[in-house]
Amino acid sequence: MTLKQLLNEWSHETNFLHEVSEEERIQLHKAILDMYIDIRTLCETHNLSVMLAGGSCLGAVSHKGFIPWDDDLDLMMPRADYNKLIDLLKGGSFSDRYQYRYPDGKKDSSSTFLKVYKKGTVLKEIDTLSDSVPNELFLDFFPIESASSFFLVRKFKAFIANGLRYISNCVCDFKRKNEVLEKAYAEKPELQMAMKRRFFIGKCFSIIDSVKWRYWYDKFVSDCSRSQYMCIPSGRLLYEGELLPSNVYLSSIKVPFENTYAYIPKEYDRYLENLYGNYMEIPPVEKRECHFIAELKL
């Protein structure tokens, strides 16, 4: 069982996390949707492709909006458009409302991909809690990368990419002092064992900061070339798990989403089946993926 799965299991057992009320969830969804509309408008203005990813895409298909228990919005973009969006943000687009972080090798980033944060909000997650990154409401942006048509080349690149990602996360966990996570370890021995392994690996590689590890990871997986296959190395199933024919990621359709619209892959059935199997089957409560929120203020 992965660390994410262990944390997800623990989150349904503990009273330590902030339990998002129905009223808060409605406000949360509205605030996230407002952020999405801003970003979508910016992308449409500059002819950039941005689609709902993962559970957000699933919600668009199954509920024409957010999955009722979901508390975030995931987006995916072809690498070339993803880079152009970062350039627009660097140029000051929405700087009055939002700030952003991505693996640039300079500032600390809580992830291996772009995150856009809404100023004036508070959203603290136990697995990324740190004073060195914004603890605010956010959108996640996953770059879609080209992948080699040669099987052995893909296998090699996936092995290196997954290793770099894991090392960067281990170093980050080792260097961050997180009292909330320590509470989780005390309550769940399996978590304690998983984190001991991560701390050991993090300590071994901590001579180089996680900021650099994430930067090297991002540079290694970045690929804007044309190819028969594409993938999302930073996605929930990692490099090979999210490998699909390029046409699945490059063609989109407009669908209803809450009181507005969004873009999802034209072949959403193939995309979602790859991620979730029988994606229209509602999972039991303990299997529902969620963020591990310690504090929320909108």
Image (tube, helix red, strand yellow):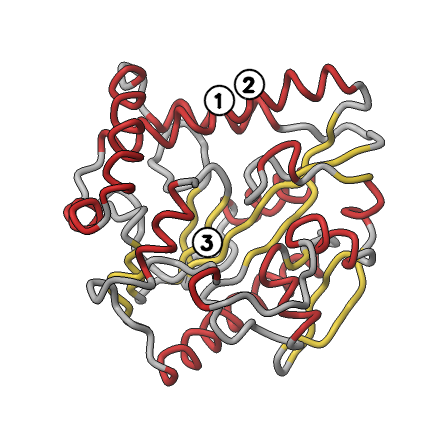
Asked whether the residues under the numbered discs 1 and 2 touch, taking CB atoms below 8 Å apart as contact, a structural biologist would say yes
Left/right of residue 68 with respect to residue 46 in the rendered view = left
Asked whether the residues under the numbered discs 3 and 1 touch, taking CB atoms below 8 Å apart as contact, a structural biologist would say no
Mark 3 and mark 2: Cα distance apart in space = 27 Å
Left/right of residue 212 with respect to residue 70 in the rendered view = left
| Residues packed near mark 2 inside 10 Å, few (<14), some (14 to 19) or many (20 plus) | some
Q: Who comes first in sequence, dot 3 or dot 1?
A: 3
Mark 1 and mark 2: Cα distance apart in space = 5 Å
Write down the residue under mark 3.
Answer: 116
Label 3's element?
A: strand
Label 2's element?
A: helix
Write down the residue under mark 2.
Answer: 160
| Residues packed near mark 3 inside 10 Å, few (<14), some (14 to 19) or many (20 plus) | many
Residue type at mark 2 is: Ile
Write down the residue under mark 1.
Answer: 163
User: Which residue shows up at 83% across the image and 52% down it?
Assistant: 251
In this picture, is 168 found above or below 23? above
Residue type at mark 1 is: Gly
Residue 133: percent from the left, percent from the top?
30, 45
In this picture, is 105 found above or below 297? above
Pick the front one: 46 or 6: 6
**Residue 236 location, quadrant:** top right
Q: Quadrant of the N terminus?
A: top left
